[in-house]
Every structure is written in structure tokens, then in C-alpha cells.
Image (tube, grey):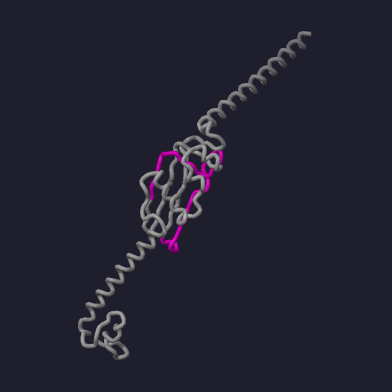
Amino acid sequence: DRIADGSSWCEYFRPACACSLASWHALPINIVLNMTALRVAFFVLAFWSIGSAGMTDLPNSLSALISDLCTATSVYTGVPSQACKLNCADCIADGGSWCENGYLDATLEIVGVQETSDLGPGNLCWSGNLFKFTDPYSYSALAGGFSLSVTPRCTDPVPAHYTCSVTGNLVVFGGAGAILLVLIIITTIICCCACRRRRYRSYAFIQ
């Protein structure tokens, strides 16, 4: 019942337990109660910190995740501005790429516990180019104890980029048709030239 310097446990823990010298026999119970209270306070504080750092679980839809990212801009810094555009016209005006069958591959990790989700399909605007989305988003807080990563992808052949009048599918099929037409024209020209050369050689041989 004594610590190294000869004082009682009650005297040693007086500031924390507020006990008297006469009640030091009851001190172990007080210690347990105080430690339990400290642990509860720690977990409450940790949960509050995680909540202030960001979401505590992933939403169940693409639109809900976009809404969370665009609403809490003071928390999720660095989200592409295009991600918050809800229609093709606004998306293209902001220099983004629009996809009618977009997905967000999201990974949320809180203190080593990881949750992943493939959200979509749905209308999605993101930074990108003629061929694909670019700039996956990542965010971390609490010294790495909280992290969120989001990777956009489009299941259309290519997203719409410069105009909403021409969809990604039309660009692909139109481009493929144009290339095929050019190949047909080139092949026709080569065949015509070869036929004329053959006829010229036959005529020269007869002469």
C-alpha cells in the first residue's frame, strides 16, 4: 500500500481521485472509475475528431458522395471544381469532362479500418480530357488516422469534353467511321493507280 517514496497511494493520487488519507482503502475502485471515465472521454474525443475530419462511413450512392464532397468544402479541400457541376453544360463550361455512366471508386480508412465502395453508375463531371477522367482525389487528416481517396472512371467509350452536343459514343463511332472512310479512299486510289500502270505496261508491250 506504499509507493517508492513511502507515501500512500491515496496521497499519490490525491489530485486525480480527490480522496482523503482516511479513505485510501477505497482508492483502487476510484482509480478504476477514473480510468474508465478517461477512456470514455478519449473515445468520445476521438470520435468527435474523426467526425470533424470528415465522414465516418461511405455514402451508398454516387450523388450522395458528390454532395458530401461539395458541401463540406472547408473539410475536403482540393476537390476538383468540376465535380460539383450537376449538368453537362456547366461541366463543359468549367473545362470538365461529362460522363452519363460514371463511377467513383472510393476508399475510406479510419484508424486502420478500411471501407471501399464502387459508387455508380450516374451522371458525373470531373476534370479530364477527350479520352478519360484525370486527377483522382485524396484527402487525409489526424496525422494519417483518417484518409479518403476517390478515383473517377467513365464506362462510356470516352467522356464528352468540348461540347454536350456530341456525346462520347458519337465521337468514337464517328471517328472510327471517318478513319474507315479514309482507308477505303486510299485503297481505291492505290488500286486505280495499279490498274492504270498495268494497262500502260500492256499497251507498251503491244507496241
> Quadrant location of residue 114?
bottom left
Name the residue rendered at 39%, 54% in the picture.
55
In front: 44, or 131?
44
Q: Give the range drawn in magenta.
A: 116-145
Q: Answer above or below: position of 33 versus 187.
A: below
Q: Is residue 118 magenta?
A: yes
The percent coordinates of residue 18 (x first, y second) are 27, 81
Number of numbered callouts drawn = 0
In front: 96, or 169?
96
> Quadrant location of residue 5?
bottom left
Asked whether, in this view, residue 166 is left or right of residue 65, the answer is right
Name the residue rendered at 43%, 63% in the picture.
142
The percent coordinates of residue 64 (x first, y second) are 39, 46
The percent coordinates of residue 130 (x first, y second) are 56, 38
Name the residue rendered at 70%, 18% in the picture.
193
Q: Answer above or below: position of 163 versus 62.
A: above
The percent coordinates of residue 11 (x first, y second) are 28, 86
> Quadrant location of residue 1?
bottom left
Q: Does the magenta stretch include residue 158?
A: no
Q: Which residue lies furthest to the top in this view?
A: 206
Asked whether, in this view, residue 136 is left or right of residue 49, the answer is right
Q: Answer above or below: position of 175 versus 195.
A: below
Q: Quadrant of the C terminus?
A: top right
Asked whether, in this view, residue 2 is left or right of residue 96, the answer is left
In front: 30, or 176?
30
Q: Residue furthest right?
A: 207
